[in-house]
Image (cartoon, helix red, strand yellow):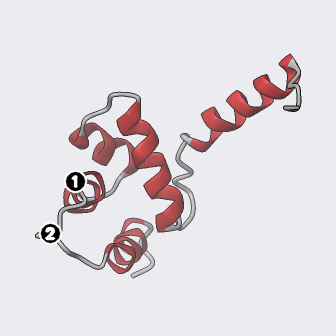
Amino acid sequence: MSPRRSANSESTVKAAETKATEPDMSKVRKWPDVAKQVQAMREQGANIPEICEKLCISYPLVNQLILRSYKMVIQSAEVFERQEKIRLGLE
């Protein structure tokens, strides 16, 4: 038997998903969290420049994540960490 879901639990899940797509720009973010936001925005129909602008990350990072091209290999986590420090003025 499969468990039943109540309407209340479904609304909680939708609220959590909406909150997850809102970027917190006041602190250093983690690449896995931002990567999930990029993928969610892409599924909602946003193009790469829109994602870059809203999340304040570089085009190559978003492009590599979306395309997953073997020809375009960068150290995404390290590049993102450096860009975050620059964005927040920590470096």
**Mark 2 — residue?**
72
Return the x and y of residue 9 as percentages of the image width and height.
84, 28
Instruction: Looking at this view, name the residue that lies furthest to the left.
Output: 71
Q: Residue lying farthest top? A: 7
Residue 67 versus residue 24: which sits nearer the camera? Answer: 67
Pick out the residue farthest to the front.
1
Which residue lies at the image location 25% right of the left edge and 35% below the top edge?
47
Label located before the other in sequence (2 or 1)? 1
Q: Amino acid at mark 1?
A: Leu
Is 62 placed left or right of 41 in the picture? Answer: left
**Residue 58 image offset from top left, x and y in percent:** 25, 59
> Residue under circle 1?
67
Residue at x 25% of width, y 60% of height: 68
The x, y position of residue 62, in whole percent, is 28, 55
Side of 64 relative to 40 (left or right): left
Above or below, 45 against 91 in this view is above
Pick the quarter of the image with the N terminus.
top right
